[in-house]
Amino acid sequence: MKKLRIHIPTICQEEIKYSFHCLLTHFLGLQIEFIDSEDDQYYRIEGHKGKSLLIENHFFQNPNPKELYQLSKIPKEVSSKILAFSKMEFEHICLYGKPELEVNPKEINLKSDIIAASFFMLSRWEEWIYEGELDRHERFPLEASLSFKSHFYQRPLVNEYVELFIALLNELGYSISNPNKYKAVISYDIDMVQKWRGIKSFLQSIFLNLKRKDFGRIINDKLSYFGNTVGLNKDPYFSFDFILDSLKNKKVSAILYFKSGVSHPRFDKNIYNVSDPKIKEVFKTLHTENVEIGLHPSYHTFDNKEKMREEFEALQIANSNHNLVNCRQHYLRFSIPETWRIMDEIGFKNDSSMVYSKEAGFRCGVCYSFPVFDCENRKMLSLQESPLIFMETPILEDEDKIINQVEKLTGIIKKYNGENIVLWHNNNLHYKKHRRSYERVLDIIQGN
Ligand SMILES: [Zn+2]
């Protein structure tokens, strides 16, 4: 196919090109070329036989990009409508412009600015300019996001736009289909590898389970603790054998994020050393089993490049100098765009930290990996963000809720042939109930 020719305004081109690049080139593999246009009211895509697709520009109209990223530019509310044409229907949420579409023989006019809306979701600029209160771990809160306030956090808005875009381009005379394939990934944050650290840890666990009146877990703890003390069984947090066994015959990729540093006395309960021969042995087994390894940088690294680099180097050395490309922030602590920039400068190729810790969903509005954009420096980085969708901790004890959420989101992700990345902590694989939920999650997410 020839390159798609796209006429764009001469202002804010970095941002506009990034948005088109993600939607058309990165997600759909299409070649595009840009042509400067004097008209800043539209982006115009040339079709066959003089036909054009016009997408109204309702955002990139200020030559000074700093003026763009203002609280007042975040939509107060969103509008939604079903857009119908050529016997197809698209449930559409519009952030900028109007949810309207006109299809004429010579011209298609989309009044909803999906270029600005995609940029809004992918660049996360609403987090960058946020001035409100952060949560107790200094994180941008779910409740402050437009997607939560406007009830579309569990819809991958950008994927919806990609499907609409494909249909509109086909209406222009092209023949385009979505080349993506469904992929399931189970990831593990290795915060701790040792539950039994003397009698105190045993009594603490018994006390917690007594409070819960969970006598099954008390018996489990006793057997586990005394068995471990006399060397009969491994520590329940050293669950690597169980993890590898659970992955056998499953159509899922796996990645384990290890911690190699401490920067907070309480929130980095890092009681292992990646250079410990026992951990190095785990690395070797993971390599043989084709399981990926990533860094789980400690609590105070999200805004500290030197500290993150130190931990990157420590893990790389411990892992026999294998190329370290994957990263996920401990506690999902993140500062947009600084943390992305730090990871990119250190040399990571991939981050997967972007889900709100409270609830599963699509924080960046997408279930495909995408290159990130540094809105402060106005440029696309090499680093890619992989969509983390679900984390078990906030609903660990509610098996039904875990299954419902994972089933619901997996159904949506399969519809778009997206990446279904879930997170389960290795220290939540001790008790029967947790293992059962975990195994059910594995069954749900794997492809057909
Ligand atoms: Zn962690």
Image (spheres, rainbow, N blue to C red):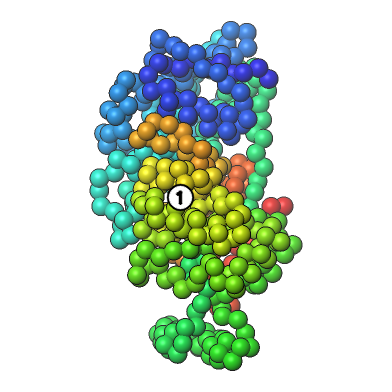
Q: Is residue 304 above or below residue 80?
A: below
Hey, which residue is sitting farthest top in the picture? 50
Q: Which residue is pictured at 67% across the width and 42% down the height?
A: 181
Q: Position of residue 229 (x, y in %)?
A: 55, 90
Q: Front-most of 206 and 230?
A: 230
Hey, which residue is sitting farthest right in the picture? 249
| Mark 1 neighbour class, 10 Å CA radius: few under 14, some 14 to 19, many 20 or more | many
Q: Is residue 190 above or below residue 23?
A: below
Instruction: Examine the image and state in which quarter residue 216 appears.
Output: bottom right
Q: Which residue is pictured at 50% across the width and 45% down the height?
A: 347
Q: Front-most of 106 and 68?
A: 68
Give the side of residue 431 with respect to residue 336, left or right. right
Q: Front-most of 387 and 324?
A: 324
Q: Is residue 201 above or below residue 291?
A: below
Q: Position of residue 170 (x, y in %)?
A: 63, 22
Q: Can residue 104 be spotted in the picture?
A: no
Give the side of residue 439 with respect to residue 358, left or right. right
Q: Which residue is pictured at 47% across the width and 46% down the height?
A: 346
Give the side of residue 120 with respect to residue 290, left or right. left
Q: Front-most of 321 and 398?
A: 321
Quickly name the residue at label 1. 354
Q: Look at the numbered disc 1 and give the secondary structure of its residue.
A: loop
Q: Position of residue 120 (x, y in %)?
A: 40, 35
What type is the residue that disc 1 sits on? Answer: Met
Q: Position of residue 174 (x, y in %)?
A: 65, 20
The quarter of the rendered structure image containing the N terminus is: top right
Q: Which residue is pictured at 57% across the width and 11% down the height?
A: 51
Q: Can residue 262 be spotted in the picture?
A: yes
